[in-house]
Amino acid sequence: MKPEPLLNFVQISDTHLRPSGSPSGWWLSDDPEDLLRSAVARVQRLGNVDFVLFTGDLFDRAEAAALDQFLEIVQDLPCPYHVVVGNHDVVAKPWTGRLTKASFAERLKLPTELYYSVAIKPGYRLIVLDTVPDQFPHAQGRLPQEQMDWLRWQLLVYRDEVVVIGVHHPPIAPAYFRDFRLNPDDGIQFAELIAASPNVAAVLSGHLHVPRRWSYRRRPFFSAPSLGGPPNAFRHFRLEVSATVARLRYDWIPVKSGERRRPLWYPLAAGTLKDRRGRYRLSLPVLGIGGGKRLRLRLRIKKLGAVS
Ligand SMILES: [Fe+2]
Ligand SMILES: [Fe+2]
């Protein structure tokens, strides 16, 4: 019997909206507004989506006008949406027409700290973190101790719920991404905390502009394709649970893929097939799948060892 998705959600990342003109990088497409409208229309057609998560760099130059554009477009989403702050979304100091963390939070009705936890539906939770440093440069992320402690407390309090975590900078990534992930100290602390939290179903990041899928101690970490630059795609996740197995099914949905000329470096931005779509088998003892069985097996082996 085909398992029913218990959680159906979308990740859109790095739209880099810029109402006032040219992009800050050659790696971006020239029509981010149209791309976001197309993505919203595509989400409408997916049906029964529980939530959309924007994993940062909604805007290219932290323009307040880009936020107006964003709000106008996403009001057509058929489900709630949640926002992670990215390094292109805010400036460090007050600047006319640009967003700081304070004004970004205020305009999007987010908590001032920009890290928060949301009950998606009974038993399912989203935790959003702020990995953007308060000072430039922002290419490498950080997770201050205060936020790490808050995350540890959240994972303890909600240990009976299935949790999805959203960040802008990926906590772990191969060495060639080292300047674009969390700094190594914060990254390893974060990854170890996730490894010790069996209720975490996935960690979703943006920033790299390429779809990637990594495992760290049997926990899935996903980096999203960019919507505002090649490969102009977003992610769709479904958590499926049957009597014996829990799986996170992940896919990517290219937007307007047939209509545009692809740059030579498109294959790099598109990743491998495994990065784009597949199924990740999860151990989710919170749903009675995975952890309990392994524990029983370990106990049995121990008992057999004691007899012999
Ligand atoms: Fe970006
Ligand atoms: Fe970024």
Image (spheres, rainbow, N blue to C red):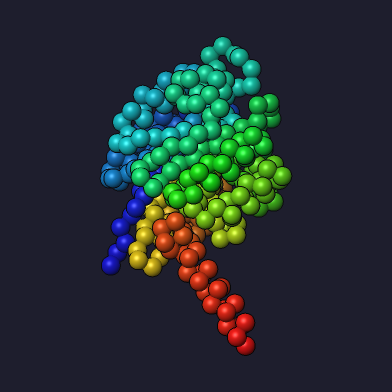
Which residue is located at x 39 percent, y 24 percent? 71
Q: Hey, which residue is sitting farthest top in the picture?
A: 96
Where 2 falls versus 42 (above or below)? below
Left or right of 136 on screen, residue 203: left
Image quadrant in which the C terminus is located:
bottom right
Compare residues 231 and 53 and report the one nearer the observer.
53
At x 58% / y 43%, what residue is drawn?
Answer: 152
Seen as rendered, the residue at the extreme right is 185
Mark yes or no: residue 136 visible: yes
Q: Residue at x 48, y 45 (%)?
A: 158
Vertical placement of 92 versus 272: above or below? above
Residue sitting nearer the eye, 157 or 66? 157
Residue appearing at x 53%, y 29% in the figure: 114
- Quadrant in which residue 255 is drawn: top left
- Furthest residue in direction front, as rendered: 307
Q: Is residue 141 visible?
A: no
The location of residue 27, given as percent across then percent down, is: 56, 38
- Decide if residue 133 is on the left or right side of residue 97: right
Q: Position of residue 299 (x, y in %)?
A: 55, 73
Q: Position of residue 58 (x, y in %)?
A: 49, 31
Quarter of the picture containing the N terminus is bottom left
Q: How many marks?
A: 0
Residue 144, position as x, y percentages in the image: 66, 35
